[in-house]
Amino acid sequence: MACKADGKDRKIFIDLLKKYSQTDQIKPFNSYTDEVELTFIGDGNLNDVIRAKCPSHSVIFKRAPPYIKCLGPEYPLDPSRGQIEYQALCVFSDLAPGSVPRPYFYDEEAKTMCMEDESSYQDYRKQLIGGTCSLGAVEKLAREIGQVHNRTHVSHVGEHSFQQLKQKFPNTELVSLTEQFIFTKPFDKSDSTNRLSEDISCSLPQIYDNPRVLEAANFMKGIFLNKKECLVHGDLHTGSIMVNGDETKMIDLEFAYMGPPAFDLGVLLANYIFSYYGHMSIPEDNDRHRKFAQLMIEACKLTVRSYLEEMTSSVGEKQQYQENLMTEMAGFAGCELIRRVVGAAPVEDLHSTYSRQDALGAGTRLLLGKDNISSVDKLLVIALMLV
């Protein structure tokens, strides 16, 4: 729910507008200091997001408090994540222009960054849930993440530049959060953060009673933590993407780090699979929803095809590298599918018992079958049980 920023908060953001008044994007505010509207927007789990608006212009402030916002001060978190996100926005904006909101400045003292306001864009997840998807947007997104991966890849930039990138994007607390909430906690049935609800109880033995699934998840955790090849978004689900027709913007880059390129693609493919199962489980107007589910299959294929046209860097022989990339995508997609069903962060796409059970089964099959997956077609056959 949006609410106005008043009192101390208003003074902080007005002072920032004054401090950076000579920045081109802030100059329009100079004549309207007393009239600026400051509104808290969004429902982010980690940060405060504020829109500053004057009659002729608007910008977004993003402030990182020293704790996990949705949990409170008793859960501390390094506020330097704001600087990492700003630096990631700068890199993405430079290597794939238009792929992210334009970054304007970062203020170290206030732990706040300022960026372009994308108020004409909508949340991608909500669009998919509503049955709207532009394949132009699917392709653009895949190409842009491919461009960033390719142009920051160790084989492309050279060792010296790669070491500089590693220093700029260290293994932060947020990488540890990802490790815990995607690869560890969901696979520990005793963890208190999991949501082992009654409607999926009959499906849980396929995870917790199968050591091969648990071993595969642990193997993917090792790749996530130890394979450092390029700059990855680090949280590329459909809630971290904004769309406007064929246009897309990636947001929430505070999880960016030097890691395996397959992680971004695996998470994104899993989110298209969520949408597939979400629509397949809707009984009303079933034909329309089944057609949209089929569109999600095309979105997965187009994503991988477009991505690989841009991501041409490799370590070793290219074809073998790309086949291994698909294997890792399958493993990461499997972990993402499972953690969104049993873990602490569910998704709205999975709105029914059937869709949750189906997604859980898909995740399990991908983890068990990942070593035999070397193409997106095989990934989809296994995940969706296509014939």
Image: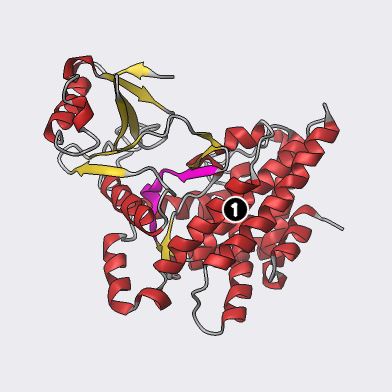
**Of residues 283 and 55, which is closer to you in this image?**
55
Whether residue 188 is visible: no
Which residue: 67% across, 65% down? 212
**Where residue 228 appears, x then y in whole percent?**
42, 69
Image position of 277 (left or right of 349): right
Q: Which residue is disc 1 drawn over?
A: 139
Q: Which image quadrant is residue 162 in?
A: bottom left
Instruction: Give the farthest residue toward the bottom.
Output: 317
Which residue: 22% across, 40% down? 111
**Of residues 363 and 263, which is closer to you in this image?**
263
Q: Was residue 234 drawn as part of the magenta stretch in this picture?
A: no
**Where residue 375 appears, x then y in whole percent?**
70, 68
Image position of 200 (left or right of 6): right
Whether residue 236 is visible: yes
Q: Which image quadrant is residue 25 in?
A: top left
Image position of 20 (left or right of 205): left
Which residue: 51% across, 44% down? 248
In the image, residue 263 above or below residue 253: below
Magenta span = 247-257
In the image, residue 156 above or below residue 276: below
Quadrant containing the N terminus is top left
**Where residue 279 appears, x then y in whole percent?**
75, 37
Q: Was residue 253 drawn as part of the magenta stretch in this picture?
A: yes
Instruction: Give the farthest residue toward the right.
Output: 387
Q: Amino acid at mark 1?
A: Glu
Quadrant containing the C terminus is bottom right
**Of residues 320 and 363, which is closer to you in this image?**
320
